[in-house]
Image (cartoon, rainbow, N blue to C red):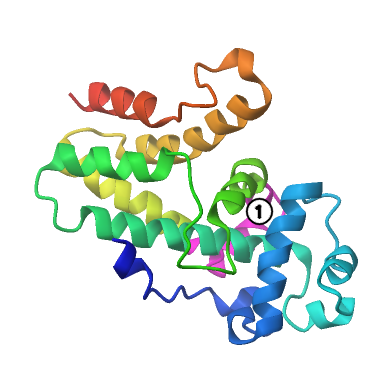
Amino acid sequence: MQNLLSNLKITINDKLYVKDPETSELGRNILKNSIILIDEIGFEAFTFKKLGEKIQSNESSIYRYFENKHKLLVYLTSWYWSWIEYRLAFATTNVSNPIEKLEKAIRLVTENVVDDNTTPHINEEILNRIIVGEFTKTLMTKEVDNENKEGFFLVYKRVINRLIDIIKEVNPDYPYAKSLASSVVEGALHQHFLKNHLKTITNLSEKECATEFYTDMTKKILA
């Protein structure tokens, strides 16, 4: 899988940026350091001015790539879900056994993420922490319906739809495949958040991820 992923070209909705950041060194530097800075200070405190200071560039240069920080965050989350989608496709495409395919899919959307060295300007381990803590902020806005129509969340929905299809392979008669798939993906993020911040209300620990829990739950539901 690693060799295949080294050749992937992630394509992001062009309505999320003014200029494609992947096309220049400055753009890639903006992506790299925005991930680091959001992780360090949180999205609320993050500003283009602070990012400009970090990369030693004018704030106006960042606006040449992104209209505002919300679209930058949606861009980063879209990049993450695209990366997950590629890994999901590679891991499950040639698996004929539905249960095995389900187990692989759940693992990929629930496991602890480590950095992928084939993408030097994106640290997926840090980006995953942002997804865990900040992803809902891209959805829970007054503009979510309009942004959904613009395709801002298309890749995220594609990841869930892949899981829906696998659930239907395991049990075609199960009537709540959509709700189950979205609950696994969203629930795993929530469990990781609890593990990091509200440890007394989750069974997860620093060494454990949500994979075993969601695999066990899903297989029992579909049995």
Mark 1 lies on a secondary structure that is helix
- Residue under the point 80% across and 79% down: 63
* Among the 4 quarters of the image, the one containing residue 47: bottom right
Residue 22 or 146: which is nearer the viewer?
22
Viewer-nearest residue: 30 or 131: 30
Residue 156 % position (x, y): 47, 56
**Camera-nearest residue between 211 and 186:** 211
Q: Quadrant of residue 178?
A: top left
Q: How many marks?
A: 1
Residue at 31% x, 34% y is: 176
Q: Residue furthest front?
A: 117
**Residue occupied by mark 1:** 138
Q: Quadrant of the C terminus?
A: top left
- Residue type highlighted by circle 1: Thr
Is residue 178 inside the magenta stretch? no
Q: Where's residue 2, x and y in %?
A: 33, 62
* Residue 52 x %, y %: 86, 71
Q: Which residue is at a point 32% across and 54% down the rendered structure image?
A: 88
Residue 195 figure quarter? top right
Count neighbours of disc 1 (C-alpha within 10 A) and say few if under 14, some if 14 to 19, many if 20 or more. Answer: some
- In the picture, the quarter occupied by the N terminus is bottom left
Residue 96 in picture, x, y percent from top left: 9, 49
The magenta stretch spans which residues?
A: 137-155
Would residue 172 be seen by someone viewing this image from the given angle? Answer: no
